[in-house]
Image: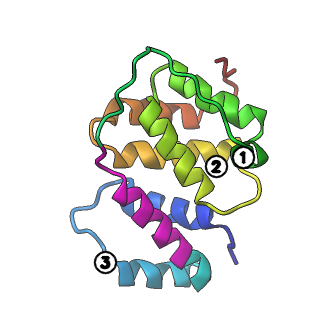
Amino acid sequence: MKENVLDVLMYLFENYFYDEPEDEPDRDSMEENLQQAGFNNGEIEKAFEWLDGLAEQRYQPEFKIRTEQPIRVFIDSETDRLDTNCRDFLMYLSNVGILDAQRRELVLDRLLALECDEISLEDIKWVVLMVLFNQPGQEANYAWMEDLMFDTEQDYRH
């Protein structure tokens, strides 16, 4: 039995959202399929809440930033769950232009909403991919991130 909210989200993303099917499946049928796949009701509900949180933030006003490269200081609750490699990767994505400040904050919000003690680099990649998929006008960044997902030997420098 699968126990992680991110596992449920990845299953939904791969089976329902990735190929953008013609007919959007309803929540009840997705929930039934998730139960048949072995996910428990608590994790399914948390995954739907996570997706609702992402959907609520789909359209936001753009940040008014005065400098080209704003400084991001991670707070204790973030550093407790994101190790140095994870934070470096997020900064790398910001520095190469995949995540602007607004989307970086959205990724951090969705990562912390996973409610797990530790977040891995692989978890971050999946969340970034889901966030970019959900954001209008981010198709090129999504495609770049999708390519990056399968490149395991890259060195990330910020």
* Residue 82 at x, y percent in the picture: 72, 43
As drawn, 84 above or below 1: above
- Quadrant of the frame with the C terminus: top right
- Looking at the rendered structure, which numbered label has been put on residue 26? 3
Packing grade of label 1 (10 A; few <14, some 14-19, many >=20) is few
**Marks 3/2: CA–CA distance:** 26 Å
Is most of the magenta stretch helix, strand or loop? helix
Packing grade of label 2 (10 A; few <14, some 14-19, many >=20) is some
* Residue 126 at x, y percent in the picture: 56, 47
Amino acid tagged 1: Ser
Read off the magenta span: 45-60
- In the image, 59 versus 140, the foreground residue is 59
Amino acid tagged 2: Asp
**Marks 3/1: CA–CA distance:** 31 Å
**Marks 1/2: CA–CA distance:** 5 Å
- The residue to which callout 1 is attached is 120
Amino acid tagged 3: Asp
Residue 86 is drawn in which quadrant? top right
Residue 52 visible in the snapshot: yes
- Looking at the rendered structure, which numbered label has been put on residue 102? none
* Residue 9 at x, y percent in the picture: 52, 63
* Residue 145 at x, y percent in the picture: 49, 34
- Looking at the rendered structure, which numbered label has been put on residue 123? 2
- Residue at 57% across / 23% down in the picture? 71
